[in-house]
């Protein structure tokens, strides 16, 4: 059954397409944060290990929210590792050292990249795609990433 919420179907498809990219970015960032949690080494291991856990738990909630937003617009969320890798603008990196500063700088860069991307989409969703709801949702998502980035930045 088609979604009838006052937004033309072609615009709903465009919104869902952009949200698919956001979901892919969130999933890759989640995976990278899990990697940091699992593989952190150094004198501050326990503190940073717990901190990364809090961050990946928050990212897990974000992913679920983005996927549910896609579904509420009548589209299916991507749900394979390959689709996430094809849709993301983030990169996977292999580290030589598993120290907190390296992980934190890498994750911070990813959060900042997502923030910039989300900020650019707020007006696009509202004005071009006529979806103020998704624009508002993405504004909140951007604010969450800004706070997470601040927490990472505070460790450096």
Image (tube, rainbow, N blue to C red):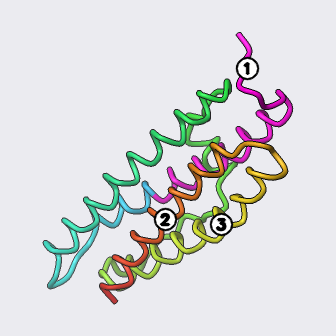
C-alpha distance separating marks 1 and 2: 29 Å
Residue 102 in the magenta stretch? The answer is no
Name the foreground residue: 144 vs 88.
144
Name the foreground residue: 1 vs 17.
1
Residue at 22 percent of width and 76 percent of height? 41
Quadrant containing the N terminus in the rendered view: top right
Mark 2 lies on residue: 143
Q: Secondary structure at mark 3?
A: helix
Q: Which residues are magenta?
A: 1-29
C-alpha distance separating marks 1 and 3: 27 Å
Q: Secondary structure at mark 2?
A: helix
Mark 1 vs 3, N-terminal side: 1
Mark 3 lies on residue: 119
**Residue 55: quarter of image:** bottom left
Residue at 35 percent of width and 54 percent of height? 58
Coordinates of residue 125 in the picture (x, y in percent): 74, 50
| In the image: residue 145, left or right of residue 53 | right
C-alpha distance separating marks 2 and 3: 10 Å
Residue lying farthest top? 1
């Amino acid at each position: 059954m088609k979604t009838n919420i006052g937004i033309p179907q072609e615009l709903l498809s465009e919104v869902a397409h952009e949200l698919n990219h956001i979901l892919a970015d969130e999933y890759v960032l989640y995976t990278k944060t899990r990697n940091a949690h699992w593989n952190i080494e150094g004198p501050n291991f326990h503190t940073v290990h717990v901190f990364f856990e809090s961050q990946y738990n928050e990212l897990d909630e974000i992913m679920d929210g983005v996927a549910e937003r896609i579904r509420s617009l009548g589209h299916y969320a991507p749900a394979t590792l390959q689709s996430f890798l094809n849709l993301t603008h983030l990169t996977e990196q292999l580290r030589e050292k598993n120290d907190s500063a390296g992980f934190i700088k890498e994750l911070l860069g990813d959060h900042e990249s997502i923030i910039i991307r989300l900020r650019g989409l707020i007006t696009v969703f509202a004005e071009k795609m006529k979806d103020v709801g998704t624009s508002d949702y993405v504004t909140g998502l951007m604010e969450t990433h800004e706070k997470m980035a601040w927490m990472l930045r505070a460790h450096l």
